Amino acid sequence: MSEYQPLGGRILTRPVLALGFIFLIGLFFMFVRFTEGMGAASNLNGGYAWGIWVVYDVMVGTAFACGGYALAFLVYVFNRGQYHPLVRPAVLTSLLGYALGGFGAFFDMGRFWQFYEIFLPWNWNFNSVMLEVGLCVSAYILVLAIEFAPALLERLGKKALLRTLNKVLFLFIALGVLLPTMHQSSLGSLLIAMGHKVHPLWQVEHLHPLLALLSALIMGFSIVVFEGSVSSVGFGRRSETHLLVKLWRVLVGLLAAFLLVRFAVLGFQGKLGLILAGDFAALMFLLETALFLVPLLILLSPAMRARGSRLLFAAVSMLLAGTLYRFNAYIITFDPGPGYGYFPSAPEIMVTLGVVALEIMAFLILVKLLPVLHREEHA
Amino acid sequence: MKRRDFLKAALGGTALAASAGAEARPNLEPAPEAVGMLFDATLCVGCKACVSACKQVNGMPPEIEGGNAAWDSARDLSGDTLNVIKVYRNGSAAVKDAEVDGFCFEKRSCMHCVDPGCVSVCPCTAMRRDPVTGIVTHHPDVCIGCRNCMVGCPYNVPQFEYDKLFGQIHKCQLCNQAGVERIDKGGMTGCAEACPTGATLFGSRAALLEEAKRRMALKPGDVYPYPRGDVRKPDSFHEKAAPAYKRHIWGEKEAGGTNVLHISAVSFDKLGMPPLGERSAASIAESVQHTIYNYMALPAIALAGLTYVVRRNSGDGDEGGES
């Protein structure tokens, strides 16, 4: 008998219907994008070629989907088997997040009908960070699908296939740690070539890959904490706070490392004065830093981190911190030069919300149909 | 592997990456027979004959604003405009080439970087630098439309046709793209040919740089024979007193240099040129990328280590329910 079980119950609950409605609105504007072109559905322009479809759907979306990555690191690399019950739901969220991130990349692609050109080896430009991102994210989506396959095979009762898969699964788990390390760092490296367009407070050049990776891990562990807290409330399951709270050491380490590198590089580059410039960018920097710092303080306090609500608050703060870090660098303080501005259009926002709604909807339905959540232990 | 060992190894790898990053790839050097243009803002009278000629050569429609169909109203580069003349205005805008209470014209078109960001970032090699002429070309047949070239260009030159469902990237290809091939045939760019004052000169990068340096050496008021057309075999000259040039040849060194050079009497930051150092962003990005992915050695070692550790930590793989 599996240690996981489907939740069962009604599929079309009110939250699912509400999310479905948002998804349909998004779908309508996706239809507009695929019939009239990108200009009809977005405010993208010559200076801001990347808007929320890239920065939210791909960069933030896949960082939110780093739960599977973060847990694989913890469980299989650092051999912390007690976190095993959290792995499967995290892998499902990762699969959904990355699949929809890939879909986001597709509808943001200006020449979507020849997307396959990036997969043809004779086209490859090995100097391109984008090549690494494109190939590596695609490969990881496949790896996640294989990592999640046992849930489906168990449900379908394909025992022989499941046994065979389990024999080689370690290889895919190893890839599942390597590939996100590669492309999550590359999602930061993309900023290097943008040079002066990236605000000096965010242009850390050689250290982009490290900061992007650290923040992706922070967001990955945060989403595990967030999901654990929310699903124990939403599905009326036993609280997993006792397990989640033990993640504090890892998160403190990651947060401290991120802030240390962030400030050290600014000091080294002689840009610390810009933090006190009192302008809009400085304000955004301070807000972003506060979102990283507050959870660090919460997690350092034994009394605060023991409380489920504070832990959830810390997780939300870290998710917002990583999100704002990406938005600040790529959009909010990004300056391509005179004559250009960008704020996402309503259809652009609705497409993104539609994708997020689809992701949550799929999670809510799949945990009821497939053995994803850990079987509760009864006394 | 113990956690401590793993962390040590990870830190070691990072340190290795960081130290190797110090031996970065330098900026690219100009192509052996690099061709380009020299734009002298002090000679430009804003007639936009170059804009018009560019559209004719490249088969692009004029941009019409309101009901005015008398001239091309393009204000910036776009999917329909590869070359545009912009104006700097200050105060009363009475005096040409004065920073205060003056005005100045500035050309915007592809600078044909010596170390082009667009070429470096393109995943599908849809942007290429000609190994002989240094001309930066675009090849839509392999382009997926990720638009990394647009964000990777310091000058916002590549432009995507957002208004079309099946749009493409457009940029100046120095009138040498397939079907036009003016340079290969010994000709010059449409804009340089059309320019009545010689504000836009065509030529080899080396000859243009020499010409720019001669002008930098002029004292204001010195009479100088300004050539028109191709700097190596000018169509004609006109004599004119030299203006008070800023001693700065844009594109000699900026981000590795450009094949299209600009000189002016108004400083370039006022003309909307970006704040660039001498090192190209592309060279930094490639240094980082090739340090991490050199022969895929680091990822291969990491995968071997991970496979070993994961296999050990997930049992012998015969237990069910792993995921």
Image (spheres, rainbow, N blue to C red):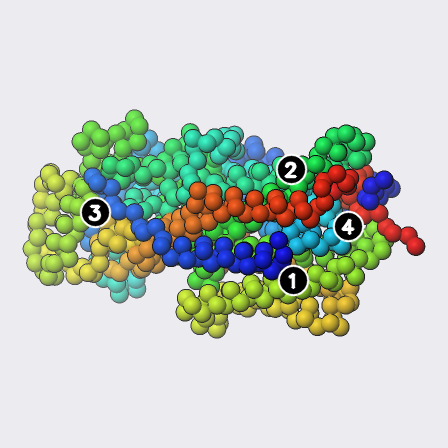
Mark 1 or 4, nearer chain start? 4
- What residue did someone put label 4 on? A85
Quadrant the C terminus of chain B occupies: top right
Q: Seen in the image, is A9 located left or right of residue B192?
A: right
Foreground mark, 3 or 2?
Answer: 3
Determine crowd level at label 1: few under 14, some 14-19, many 20+ residues with C-alpha closer than 10 A. many
Q: Position of residue B159 (x, y in %)?
A: 41, 41
**What separation in Å lies between label 3 and label 4 (alpha carbons)?**
67 Å
Q: Label 4 is placed on what type of residue?
A: Pro
- What residue did someone put label 3 on? B38
Q: Residue at the spot x=23%, y=49% of the render?
A: B261
Badge 1 marks a residue whose secondary structure is: helix
- What residue did someone put label 2 on? A28
Badge 4 marks a residue whose secondary structure is: helix
Q: Label 1 is placed on what type of residue?
A: Leu
Q: Are marks 2 and 1 in contact (CB under 8 Å)?
A: no
